[in-house]
Amino acid sequence: MNVYIKGKLNGRFLRLLCDTGASCSCISLKYFNRHLRNNTQLLPNTENQLYVSANNSFLNIVGIVNISLLLGTKTTNVKFLVMKDLSQDAILGSEFLSSTSAVINFDSNTISLFRGTVVLPLVTSLDDTRVVRTFKPVRIRANCEAIIPVKLPDIKQSLAITESLPNLRNRGLGVAAVLVDGKCRNTMIRVINVSDSPIFLKERKPVAYLTLIQPSSAGIHLTDMSPFFETARTDMSNDKANDVHNINSSSTDSSQSQQRARGPSADRFPPGPRVTTINSADIPSAAHSCSTATSEHSSDTARTACGHARPQATGTPFTKPNVCLTYCGYCHLS
């Protein structure tokens, strides 16, 4: 839900949106042509800075105006950027709010400016054409999320975003900001109760607010990223070549080390799989999960089979007959 204050711009009352997400103050070209063009000079925009809207589209700046703004009993001169297709008549951005030491208090529903010398009420009265209401009575448990059925207002366009209401937010109820289709009057929204007590909502109770999105301003702006991919591909190719060189070098070093490490005792273990012979007395009891399969003759080699077995390294001989030959991790014998 947007927060507005009432002020007097060049002697004319209007609602101004307090937008902490806007870096500058701006006014719509439509409002300027209707009320200010005859008595306000439009200066050319000499700034090279580009401004982007919330949907990542570039804003069209027509010019700059310096206008006297009356807020309560205080008059100040404010620089506004005149922009095309602005959704609001006038916006007070973070630059103005910071310079006036603005403090927004939702508990008292007021805003203080100029170090507390001016206190104005927030204009947060609900526009009934944008209020989302409950479809039936609901109870939201404490510290829980819920998906509740709601009824959307009959908006004249298809796209809008749900927002929390300040009075319910103060009670601990938040509404997920999601994109909704205004053509579907009955829908579901996601809410969360962060308080320690349940919240009851009657039928047709206002639970959320819709911020309309102009279809003309919504869109996807694509950026050509092919140069970055080409650079990344080149870097990956270089890294791959270095890795292959390192592997070949390490393989050569490893083979040389193995040749140096080979001694007279190395011939006792010819290459190939190794098995260990186990006498019948060393075979563990059936209580363990390893099953032992023996051949027809007791002198033959005994092999173990385990359902949890993992492949064994063929280069390491087994030395302990009282340990499962498969080292499965589930049936270690003690």
Image (cartoon, grey):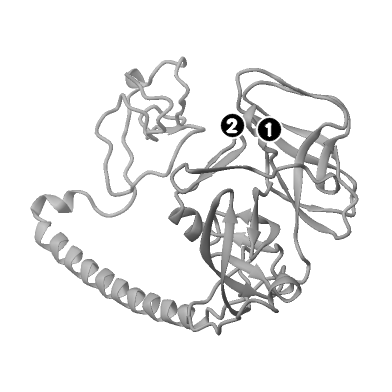
Which residue: 16% across, 60% down?
A: 258
Q: Look at the image and tell me in which quarter the C terminus lies.
A: top left
Task: Determine which quarter of the picture holds residue 152.
Answer: top right
Which numbered disc covers residue 19? none
- According to the picture, the residue beneath numbered tag 2 turns out to be 107
Q: Nearer the viewer, residue 164 or 327?
A: 164
Give neighbour class at mark 2: few <14, some 14-19, many 20+ (Cα, 10 Å): few
* Label 1 sits on residue: 167
The location of residue 49, given as percent across then percent down, is 48, 77
Classify residue 247 as left or right of residue 54. Answer: left
In the rendered view, tell whether residue 286 sits above or below residue 302: above
Point out the tag, 1 or 2, that comes first from the N-terminus. Answer: 2
> What is the three-letter code of the residue carrying label 1?
Asn
- The kind of residue tagged 2 is Asp
Q: Secondary structure at mark 1?
A: helix
Q: Residue at x 24, y 67 (%)?
A: 251
**26 left or right, relative to 204:** left
Residue 86 appears at what percent x and percent y? 69, 68
* Secondary structure type for disc 2: loop
